């Protein structure tokens, strides 16, 4: 067995041994209920030993501890706060907490009853959380929701299932890391990407800009996206289906069952399908006559995409030995036709890819495993495979015509089947030293092993060289916290990576980083925050070995590091009883060494990752929101970022490079969005609700090549698009009908040069939701 696999298996065994020992520790799970005058108090905030949760609509909540006494504080809008050290006895009967109405003005209790989204936004990090539940009646995927956040720009190369590149405060691509419930998504495969995961899978989405919390266990350079799913014990079904332009179908089914004994079963399933046969405007030439047509309007004819995915988990919750212990299987498959290369001058008519994911998973979580010690363990291994199929000896034009093209396929004749077997094991522990002090430990180990063969030419497999990578990241941190006044965290990270191709000498890299995040509340609703990190990012396996589609390999790629500084503030206030405002702003500075960026290869047919000696980034973003009662919501955000090339000397120049201190090309630098929604209650019956919304997207034009080089720099044109939607909910949200119109003005949209996105599109979404909370 190879060295990397031995290391990974050893770590998994250690984690399993640790779990076995931890499972023997004793603790009890208690149920509490919040009442006022005998009636349940919904959404009350409960603070237990610095942990925060919310009561459900029946006033119920649960907590697990091995202590005999705990301090509990309960707050709710319009109620006097409850704060008391209580003794714990038997966990059989619920503990009832009676709150008294507060006669004081509402302004004095606005800081109480915060949602989990509010709590996340109050961290010391530069973080924004999206309440995904408010988007469940849309056809958005995760990336579509992120595209409305200040500082974020999601760039896609086409329609449903196309390649995407998320830019966050100037950093993009693999500078940004993605997580589900704190678990890295690096090894989830092509069937599980943020642009094909529906928003209904998430309860909220957390966006960390710049400095990334140590507990995420990431070597991100510029930020992280954490998709948080619901962990509430409930019996529910949430199913939706949508149909729209370009023969687009989406289906989502989320369901869960939790019994009184703690047995739980969770199911998430979804599918996406689209022909992506939208019209594009291109310069086209007839492959037979050579007749050239400038700005020809043609329809994409080889761009079908579909994927299907199932995530099933079974286990127990709220047990003395585990708050959550789940084993599961993640299964997915996808089919993707490839219409163009990195630019639309290349046209394909038969080349396509298939992939699947087969990934067993283990999740374990326990608060107060020992007094004050919280532990989380996760492990998974992707056994899936990918297939790159290029068998037609043809050359196509944009009119769908083709003619023979020798015997080399459309790009490189092959049926190349390969496995990117990737494993992951994570451990996160937090120990509460006292009311204000805590220590944290995080370790993430991952392994990558690609093996492949060309099924059209089995003999060539004799010369195939395996591609392997192993990475481990260890982090430690210390936090000091005075609730709602001041919070500071210091941390350090050590990263080790080893890459090898075949039997060649392996390359090894070790990097050490550190950081600090601090926040202070000048007033209960006025927060200032600052953070700094010297962060390191190792090249991904796909940057080193390529993705066998449009990403070329670069085994000599070096790790990158960056100084990240963030300053921010946010403030919320009321005017009268019904007008609510919030405003937030952030300043950023980054200086990255050995900055990894994608450029075109020599024949401009593929992208290749390369290092740039230095890149400096300065930027700012701001957002503002307003609401009137439950009837009207307005909001908007704006982002400016300037990325400057700091590489003074380059191989192709004598003396100082003419692009030294130039603005980095092919990166959006000024963009924003605005939204508005109007809500009408009890339309057509009690409990029915109609909402009408609007969203505006603006992206300023930017250059594809270096601005100072002169000549034809080529522009990615300015983008302005308008979306409108209407959702009618019946029976308090049990039945929902949604209509959407995207890119209503039918603008020609380009996130990447010449790669046109869909025009005007319409969608119908039907959703059914039923829930029964576990008592």
Image (cartoon, helix red, strand yellow):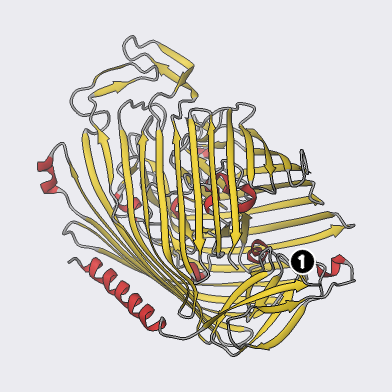
| Residue drawn 68% across the image and 43% down it | 729
Structural crowding at the residue carrying mark 1, measured as other residues with C-alpha within 10 Å and reported as few (<14), some (14–19) or many (≥20): some
| Residue drawn 18% across the image and 59% down it | 504
The quarter of the image holding the C terminus is bottom right
Q: Nearer the viewer, residue 525 or 642?
A: 525
Q: Nearer the viewer, residue 78 or 687?
A: 687
Which x, y percent locates residue 245? Answer: 53, 28
Name the residue that disc number 1 marks: 526
Residue 358 seen in render: yes
Q: Nearer the viewer, residue 131 or 40?
A: 40
Which x, y percent locates residue 724? Answer: 67, 35
Which x, y percent locates residue 106? Answer: 86, 65
- Position of 655 compared to 110: left or right? left
Residue 663 seen in render: no
Which x, y percent locates residue 48? Answer: 64, 79
Place residue 98 in its image quadrant: bottom right
The quarter of the image holding the N terminus is bottom left
């Amino acid at each position: 067995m190879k060295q990397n696999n031995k290391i990974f298996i050893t770590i998994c065994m250690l984690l399993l041994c640790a779990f076995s020992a931890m499972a023997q520790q004793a603790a009890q799970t208690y149920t509490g209920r919040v009442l006022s005058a005998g009636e349940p108090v919904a959404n009350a905030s409960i603070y237990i030993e610095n942990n925060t949760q919310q009561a459900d609509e029946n006033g119920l909540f649960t907590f697990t501890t091995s202590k005999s006494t705990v301090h509990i504080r309960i707050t709710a809008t319009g109620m006097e706060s409850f704060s008391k050290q209580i003794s714990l006895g038997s966990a059989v009967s619920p503990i009832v907490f009676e709150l008294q109405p507060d006669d004081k003005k509402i302004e004095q209790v606005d800081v109480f009853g915060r949602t989990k989204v509010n709590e996340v936004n109050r961290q010391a990090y530069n973080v924004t959380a999206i309440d995904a539940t408010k988007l469940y009646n849309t056809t958005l995927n995760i990336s579509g929701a992120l595209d409305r956040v200040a500082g974020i720009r999601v760039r896609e190369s086409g329609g449903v299932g196309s390649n995407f590149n998320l830019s966050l405060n100037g950093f993009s691509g693999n500078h940004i890391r993605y997580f589900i419930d704190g678990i890295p998504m690096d090894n989830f495969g092509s069937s599980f990407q943020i642009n094909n995961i529906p928003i209904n899978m998430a309860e909220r989405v957390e966006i960390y800009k710049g400095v990334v919390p140590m507990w995420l266990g990431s070597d991100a350079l510029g930020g992280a996206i954490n998709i948080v799913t619901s962990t509430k014990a409930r019996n529910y079904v949430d199913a939706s289906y949508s149909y729209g332009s370009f023969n687009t179908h989406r289906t989502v089914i989320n369901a869960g069952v939790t019994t009184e004994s703690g047995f739980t079963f969770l199911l998430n399933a979804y599918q996406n399908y689209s022909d992506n046969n939208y019209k594009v405007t291109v310069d086209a030439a007839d492959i037979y006559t050579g007749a050239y047509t400038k700005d020809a309007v043609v329809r994409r004819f080889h761009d079908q995409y579909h994927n299907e995915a199932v995530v099933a988990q079974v286990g127990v919750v709220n047990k003395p030995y585990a708050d959550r212990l789940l084993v599961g299987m993640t299964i997915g498959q996808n089919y993707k036709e490839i219409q163009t290369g990195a630019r639309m001058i290349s046209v394909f008519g038969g080349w396509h890819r298939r992939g699947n994911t087969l990934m067993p998973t283990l999740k374990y979580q326990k608060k107060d495993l020992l007094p004050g010690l919280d532990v989380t363990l996760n492990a998974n291994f992707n056994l899936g495979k990918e297939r790159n199929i290029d068998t037609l000896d043809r050359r196509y034009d944009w009119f769908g015509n083709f003619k023979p093209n020798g015997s080399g396929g459309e790009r490189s004749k092959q049926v190349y089947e390969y496995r990117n077997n990737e494993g992951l094991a994570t451990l996160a522990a937090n120990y509460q030293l006292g009311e204000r002090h805590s220590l944290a430990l995080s370790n993430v180990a991952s392994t990558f092993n690609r093996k492949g063969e060309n099924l059209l030419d089995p003999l060539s497999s004799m010369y195939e060289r395996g591609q392997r990578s192993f990475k481990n990241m260890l982090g430690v941190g210390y936090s000091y916290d005075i609730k709602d006044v001041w919070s500071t965290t210091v941390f350090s990270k050590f990263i080790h990576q080893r890459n090898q191709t075949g039997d060649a000498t392996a390359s090894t890299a070790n990097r050490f980083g550190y950081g600090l995040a601090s926040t202070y509340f000048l007033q209960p609703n006025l927060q200032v925050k600052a953070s700094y990190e010297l962060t390191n990012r190792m090249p991904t396996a796909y940057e080193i070995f390529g993705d066998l589609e449009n990403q070329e390999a670069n085994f000599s790629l070096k790790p990158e590091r960056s100084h990240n500084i963030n300053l921010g503030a946010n403030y919320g206030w009321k005017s009268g009883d019904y007008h609510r405002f919030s405003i937030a702003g952030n300043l950023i500075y980054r200086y990255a060494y050995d900055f990894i960026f994608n450029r075109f290869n020599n024949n401009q047919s593929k992208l290749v990752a390369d290092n740039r000696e230095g890149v400096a980034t300065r930027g700012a973003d701001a957002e503002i929101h307003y609401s009137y009662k439950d009837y009207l919501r307005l909001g908007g955000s704006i982002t400016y970022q300037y990325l400057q090339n700091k590489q003074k000397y380059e191989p192709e120049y004598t003396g100082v490079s003419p692009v030294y201190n130039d603005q980095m090309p092919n990166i959006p630098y000024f963009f924003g969005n605005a939204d508005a929604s109007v809500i009408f209650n009890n339309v057509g019956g009690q409990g029915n609700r109609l909402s009408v919304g609007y969203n505006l997207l603006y992206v300023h034009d930017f250059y594809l090549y270096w601005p100072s080089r002169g000549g034809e720099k080529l522009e990615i044109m300015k983008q302005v698009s308008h979306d409108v939607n209407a959702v009618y909910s019946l029976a308090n949200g049990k039945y929902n009908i949604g209509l959407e119109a995207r890119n209503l003005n039918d603008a020609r949209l380009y996130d990447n040069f010449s790669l046109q996105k869909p025009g005007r599109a319409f969608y119908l979404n039907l959703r059914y939701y039923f829930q029964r909370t576990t008592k």
